[in-house]
Image (tube, rainbow, N blue to C red):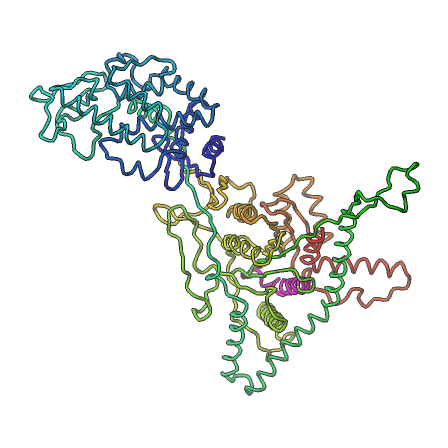
Amino acid sequence: MIDKLAKLLATEDIIVEHRNAITASFDTKNRILTLPMWKDTSHTLETLLVGHEVGHALYTPDSGWSQMANQKKMICNVVEDARIERKMKIKYPGLRRDFYEGYKELFDKDFFKIKDKKIETMNFLDRLNLHFKIGAFQSIPFEEDEKCFVDDVENAKTWNEIIDITNRIFNFLKKKEDDLDSPPEYIRGDKSKDSDGEGQEDSDGEGQEDSDGEGQEDSDGEGQEDSDGEDEFSCNTQTAMNDNIAEKLIDDKSKPFVYVNIEDVEYKDKTLSYTTILQMFRDEKNKSINCGNIGSREDLISKIAKQNKVSWNKFLNVNSKVVSYLVKEFEMKKAADHYIRQREAKTGVINCNKLHAYTIIDDIFKKTVILPESKNHGLVLFVDFSGSMSENMHGTIEQLLCLTLFCRRINIPHRVYAFTDQKFSEEYIRKPSYISNRVGDIIVRDEDKLLELFTEKMRNNQFSEMGEWLLNFAEGLDRYRTRNYIKHDADKWYSSCIRLNSTPLNSSLIYARKLITDFKKQTNAQIVNCVVLTDGDSNANSYVSELGPVGFGYSIRSKLIARDIQTKQEIVIKKSTHDTAYGQRNTDIFVEFLRNRCDINVICYRIENSYSRIRKTIHGAYDLEIAEINCKKMRKQKYFQMKDFMKFDDYFLIHGGENINTEDSLLGDEIHETKNTLMKAFMKANVRRGVSRVLLSKFIEKIAA
C-alpha cells in the first residue's frame, strides 16, 4: 500500500525498494525510492517519511546536491527539507494532517532529544530545523538578526533560492564565530558533549581554533576535525531524529529483500532465421553427398529429394482437405459472430415508404445496420525441442504444419519458433552482443536460442522446403527412437543437424517480450495469441548477486521479488503450491510479465504421455471431488482445458502419442448398414478430427470469437 502511495505522490512510476537501510532515501538520478524495513510504525508516520522523500524526488535536483560543498550540506539539508515539505503540503493538502501528527508523534517520543533542554539555548540550525518540523505546536524563539533567514526559508520556492540562503546562513554563522573568541553552544554545535549533555574540554582547557579556522575538538574532546570531511556547523536535532528512527523503528531482524530485474533483451542475435536453418539442412545434405558413402552422388541427390517429396505429399494429401474444411468452418463462425453482434440504428432520415403511416406508427425513419469492427489477429508459437519430446515430435511437427497451412490460407501473420540450448557453429549464428552482469539481473544463458521455423514472410517454395526437412527430421527421430529399420528403410537419409536437448522455456519467454513487441509493430496485429507447446518443465534460471549467480526461486533466508523493468510490475516469489518442478521454476512469473508487457493472450499446450502425471497436475489444481470428474473428462476426450493455471490464459493437457498424429481417414473402412450408424460414425470422426488437430481447432475457436 505504501508503495502505491509513493508512486501516486511522485506522479511517476518510480521504483520503490524495501531494504535493510538506516533511513528512507531517494536516488534522484535513477529514480529509486529506498524505504527501510520499519517495525511498530504508525500509518501516519510512514506517510510522513514517504511524503518527505517523494518531495526530494519531485523538487530536489541531483546535480545540485552532489555539487554542494560538504561544509554546507547540513545547512542545505535543513532549509531544503523545509522547502520540499511545504511544497508537498501545497500540492497535496491532505498531507498536512499526516505531517502534523507524524512530527507530533516523533516529538512526544523525544526523537529530537530536546526533552530536558531549553530550546532558546540551542544553536541556530537546531532551532531552524525544529521550527519547520514542530513549529505548528511548539513555539521556537529566534533573535532579531536570525528572523530574516526564517522568513527567507518560508518563502523559498526554487533550488537556486535554497543555494543562496545556504550560503548566506553559512556566512552569517561563520561571522558570528569569528566575532567570538569562544563561540557559545547556540551558535556552533558542541561536538565535545557526550550523550547526557555534558562535555569535556581538551587537554589545554581551551576551544582553540587552528590557523585555518577549524576546531580541534572531536567526539571525545581530543583531536582535530578534517577540513574536507566534516560539516562546519552541526544540527543535533536532525542527527538525533535520524539515529532514533534507525534504532527504534527499523526492523533489522526481518528477511532482506532481494530484487531480480527482468527486462527486454535482444533476441535477434540469439535466433537462427528460417533462411539460415534451410541453409543448414542443405549444407548437411551436401556434406553427406560429397562423402559418397551411399551410392553415387547423382543417385543420392535424387533419393533424398524423392524421399522428402513423398513425405510432404503424403502429409498434404492427408491434411489439405481437412484444413480447407476448417478454413470454411472458421469463416462461418466469424460470419455468425458478426451477425450476432450487429445491430440496427436509426439514421435520422425519413423513410418515404413509411410516411403515409405516420399517424399510427412512430418509427418512420430509415435504419442502418452497424457491424462490429474486425480486428487483426496474429500468432506467435514456441515449440519445445527437448529430448523428452522425441516420442511426440512427429505428431507435433504435423500439428505445426496444419496450423501454418491454416494461417497462410486466411493470411494471419504468424511466427513459429523452436526453443533449444543446442550449440551451433559460428558459421550460422553470431556471438551475442550483450550478456548482462549487473547485480540483480536475471541470467539468460548464451546457449539458449530460438529457431525460426515458419513466418508469413516465407515464399511458397521455402515453406514447402521447410516442411519437407522438418518431416524428415521427425521421421529420423522415430527411426532412432524405435529402432524400427524395417518400417523405415535402412537406406533412407535423415537429417541430424538439429538435435533435441533440454528445455529453456523461461529464456524463450524473456526473448518473446521484445520479439512480440516488434511483431505487433511489423504486422499491425491487434490481438496476438502466444502459444507454448511443451511436454516438460523449464530449465532453472539464475540471477546475478554480489556473490555470483544464485538460483531464481523461493528462499527461506530472503524475500525474493521479481521486477519487470519496463512495466514496473513486482511479484513476490512464494513457495509453490504445485508439487511439480513446473511450479518450482517460476515459469508463471515470466508468463504474467510477458502478458502484461505485450498485452497478449498466453496459451500453453502441455503434452503428457503418462496419465499419472496428468492426474497429478489436475489434482494439484482442483479439489479432490472436482479433480476426479476432470480426470474422467480427460480420459474421454484425450485433452483437458484449464483456465488461469500457472498464469496462462488457457492451459491444455493433451495425452500424447498417437492422439496428436493427424489421421488420414474420417470414417475408416468399416461398412455402415443404416443411416443412424453412418451418422454416428461421421460424428465420431469429426470428434477424432478435432482431437487429432486440437492445436488448430482451439486456435480457430480463439480467433473466431
> Does residue 483 show up?
no
Could you say which quadrant of the image residue 166 lies in?
A: top left
In percent of the image, x 76 and y 61: which residue is there? 328
405 within the magenta span: yes
Q: Nearer the viewer, residue 151 or 370?
A: 151
* Number of numbered discs: 0
Measured as percent of width and height from the top left, residue 391 is found at: 60, 63
Q: Nearer the viewer, residue 316 or 523?
A: 523
In percent of the image, x 52 and y 52: which residue is there? 513
Measured as percent of width and height from the top left, residue 668 is found at: 79, 66
Could you say which quadrant of the image residue 100 lies in?
A: top left
Identity of the residue furthest to the left in this view: 204
Measured as percent of width and height from the top left, residue 477 is found at: 58, 68
Measured as percent of width and height from the top left, residue 434 is found at: 40, 57
12 within the magenta span: no
Q: Nearer the viewer, residue 240 or 180?
A: 180
Q: Is residue 340 left or right of residue 630?
A: right
In percent of the image, x 48 and y 42: which residue is there? 568
Magenta highlight range: 385-407
Q: Main secondary structure of the magenta part?
A: helix
